[in-house]
Image (spheres, rainbow, N blue to C red):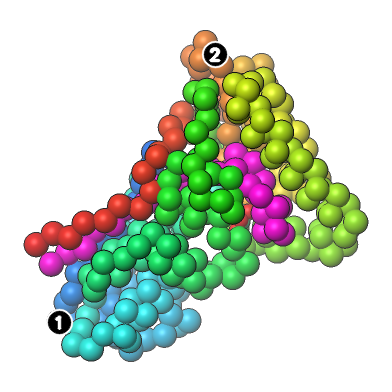
């Protein structure tokens, strides 16, 4: 028997980094997914196959002993194996169309899909349960996670975190994702922002208040079908991200290049590399490729309304 689960990647429209410090954030699941397939084996090992390589460790191994990117899988496998006798081994295979390490939720989607797939070998589960254990799994590589990414990967659609209620936006967001092709470490960027906060406590607290106000204004703009304000708020949010120093020359130059065709643009995710999102008018989409350097990838993001999905196969 195989247990197969899939989960979407994500973009953060507003509020990255500040969300780690307790503000709200607006996130959306995107139509790029990761699929995790799990099966029992008789090998007395936990085996993980992914595009990053293969790991095979004895069934009793601790997750702390595994290489970083494999830890969540060993953690989840152990959790189930320890509470179920008669398991001689597990094989976990990851297939993903989410680019890795560029802020599109590859790691969170993997944790959610792996939790769904591994737990699905043993029992039926609820989304609440999968969210809780996927955040535990993500913490094995990134202890400070806000949990926002795993939440949107579990429930899908667009949400105003910490609520899981879907935002039914009235206008079609033509969101362009541009990949700087510079990989980043979310953990390092979050630590950098923690240092900024330590050294600039008062300003950081003001920025959190400004972010909260901005998100309230975005929600109103969406209700009013006001794309212009939505775009302006993206650019305003980018100024806050610049101030906490998670931007760089490459990202600034990409944002600058998209200025003439977009209503607003900003980093999405941790920054320091990764991706930029821009709200582009329909009639301007054709112009985009000519504006960006050839080594950058770009594509239109469609919001994925489906969160984690799961099935068993013979
Ligand atoms: C990373 O996608 C988003 C951050 O806000 C970190 C987090 O929320 O855990 C930078």
102 and 161: which is toward the camera: 161
Q: Residues within 10 Å of mark 2 (few under 14, many from 20)?
A: few
Q: Which residues are magenta?
A: 1-29
Q: Main secondary structure of the magenta part?
A: strand
Question: What secondary structure is found at the residue carrying circle 2?
Answer: helix
Q: Is residue 301 magenta?
A: no
Residue 111's spot in the image, x, y percent? Answer: 42, 62
Residue beneath disc 2? 284
Left or right of 60, for residue 87: left
Residue drawn 79% across the image and 63% down it: 195
Q: Does residue 292 lie above or below 95 as drawn?
A: above
Quadrant for ligand 1? bottom right
In percent of width and height, residue 196 lies at 81, 58
Residue in the foreground of this view, choosing between 176 and 25: 25
Q: Along the polypeptide, which appears first: circle 1 or circle 2?
A: 1
Q: Residues within 10 Å of mark 1 (few under 14, many from 20)?
A: few
Q: Is residue 178 above or below residue 29?
A: above
Looking at the image, is 240 positioned above or below residue 37?
Answer: above
Instruction: Tell me where residue 58 sits by quadrant.
Output: bottom left
Q: Which residue is mark 1?
A: 42
């Amino acid at each position: 028997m195989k247990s197969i689960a899939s989960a979407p990647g994500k973009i953060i429209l507003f509020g990255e980094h500040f969300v780690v410090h307790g503000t709200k954030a607006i996130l959306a699941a995107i139509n790029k997914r990761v699929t995790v397939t799990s099966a029992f084996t008789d090998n007395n090992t936990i085996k993980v196959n992914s595009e990053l390589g293969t790991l095979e460790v004895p069934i009793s191994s601790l997750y702390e002993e595994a290489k970083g990117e494999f830890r969540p899988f060993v953690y989840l496998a152990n959790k189930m194996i320890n509470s179920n006798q008669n398991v001689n081994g597990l094989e976990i295979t990851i297939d993903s169309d989410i680019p890795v390490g560029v802020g599109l939720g590859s790691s969170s989607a993997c944790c959610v899909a792996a939790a769904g797939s591994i737990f699905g070998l043993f029992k039926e589960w609820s989304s609440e349960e999968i969210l809780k254990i996927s955040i535990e799994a993500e913490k094995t590589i990134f202890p400070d996670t806000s949990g926002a990414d795993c939440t949107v990967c579990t429930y899908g659609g667009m949400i105003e975190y910490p609520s899981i209620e879907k935002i039914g936006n009235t206008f079609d967001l033509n969101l362009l994702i541009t990949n700087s092709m510079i990989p980043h470490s979310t953990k390092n960027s979050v630590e950098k922002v923690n240092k900024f906060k330590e050294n600039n406590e008062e300003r950081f607290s003001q920025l959190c208040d400004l972010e909260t106000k901005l998100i309230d204004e975005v929600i109103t703009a969406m209700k009013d079908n006001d794309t212009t304000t939505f775009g302006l708020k993206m650019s305003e949010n980018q100024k806050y991200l610049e101030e906490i120093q998670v931007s760089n020359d490459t990202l600034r130059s990409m944002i600058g290049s998209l200025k003439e065709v977009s209503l607003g643009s900003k980093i999405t995710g941790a920054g320091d590399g990764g991706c930029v999102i821009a709200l582009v008018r329909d009639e301007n989409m054709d112009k985009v490729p000519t504006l960006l350097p050839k080594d950058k990838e770009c594509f239109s993001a469609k919001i994925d309304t489906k969160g984690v999905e799961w099935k068993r196969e013979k």
